[in-house]
């Protein structure tokens, strides 16, 4: 057996062939800085309303090789939902798909503006009319995160749909 391997290398060389080093693994596809602009939201959070009352808990993880930020939100009062968030390099935008146990599907696109993650999209309002939605995530100096969800009314004026402060557990 050893004799065959001794002759194999010179034989390959005689035909202009070589034994290549094994290929190295490609770098992770989501290694760029833009894929990590939403990392400030990763963690386990207690969520409070502006008056300090309990709004829910949120478990936000990074998945799929650092490509996806996955949110699991529950209020403990019968409402829950989750979102998948990812930087879409082809369109150069952040995308969020939110679904909940009320049947809402919310598709948002946006960007990191240097201070906030701002995502916008369309969803039916209380009257069933499609209206513009905007969710702004702001990392605070103390490590908390503010999530401000606004909905445009019939005249385009923004009203607050949800305002929550996320504090790490």
Image (cartoon, grey):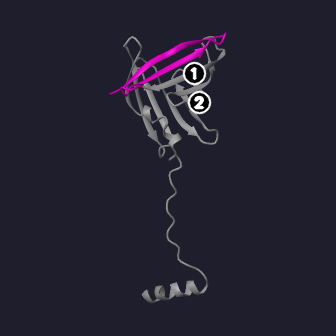
Mark nearer the N terminus (1 vs 2): 2
The residue drawn where x is 51% and y is 65% is 23
The image quarter containing residue 3 is bottom left
Residue 75: quadrant of the picture: top left
The local crowd at label 1, few if under 14, some if 14 to 19, many if 20 or more residues have their Cα within 10 Å, is: many
**Tag shown at residue 168:** none
Task: Estimate the x, y position of residue 109 in percent, counting from the top left.
Answer: 60, 30
In the shown orientation, is residue 131 left or right of residue 135? right
Q: Is residue 96 magenta?
A: no
Q: Is residue 164 above or below residue 21?
A: above
Give the Cα distance between marks 1 and 2.
Answer: 9 Å
Image quadrant holding the N terminus, namely bottom left
Category of crowding for the residue at label 2, using alpha-carbon neighbours closer than 10 angstroms: few (below 14), some (14–19), many (at least 20): some
SS type, badge 2: strand
For the point 43% across and 36% down, the residue is: 61
Which secondary structure class fits the magenta region best? strand
Front position in the image: 151 or 2:
151
154 inside magenta stretch: yes
Whether 22 is drawn above or below 55: the answer is below
Q: Dot 1: what SS?
A: strand
> Residues in magenta?
140-169
Tell me the residue that label 2 is attached to.
110
- Residue 54 image position (x, y, % from top left): 37, 16
Q: Is residue 147 left or right of residue 169?
A: right
Q: Position of residue 16 (x, y in %)?
A: 61, 82
Task: Tell me where residue 142 sits by quadrant.
Answer: top left
Q: For residue 134, which numbered disc appears in the image?
A: 1
Numbered-mark total? 2
Residue at 53 percent across and 40 percent down: it is 34
């Amino acid at each position: 057996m050893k004799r065959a391997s001794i002759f194999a290398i010179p034989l390959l060389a005689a035909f202009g062939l070589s034994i290549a080093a094994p290929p190295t693994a490609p770098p992770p596809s989501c290694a760029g800085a833009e894929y990590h602009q939403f990392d400030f939201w990763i963690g386990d959070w207690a969520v409070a309303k502006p008056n300090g009352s309990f709004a829910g808990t949120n478990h936000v993880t990074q998945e799929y090789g650092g490509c996806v930020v996955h949110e699991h939100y529950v209020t403990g009062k019968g409402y829950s939902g989750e979102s998948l968030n990812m930087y879409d390099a082809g369109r150069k935008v952040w995308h969020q798909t939110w679904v909940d146990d009320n049947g809402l599907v919310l598709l948002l696109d946006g960007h990191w503006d240097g201070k906030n993650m701002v995502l916008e999209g369309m969803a039916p309002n209380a009257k069933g009319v499609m209206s513009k939605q905007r969710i702004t995530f702001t990392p605070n100096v103390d490590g908390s995160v503010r999530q401000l969800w606004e909905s445009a009314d019939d005249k385009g004026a923004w009203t607050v749909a949800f305002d929550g402060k996320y504090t790490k557990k």
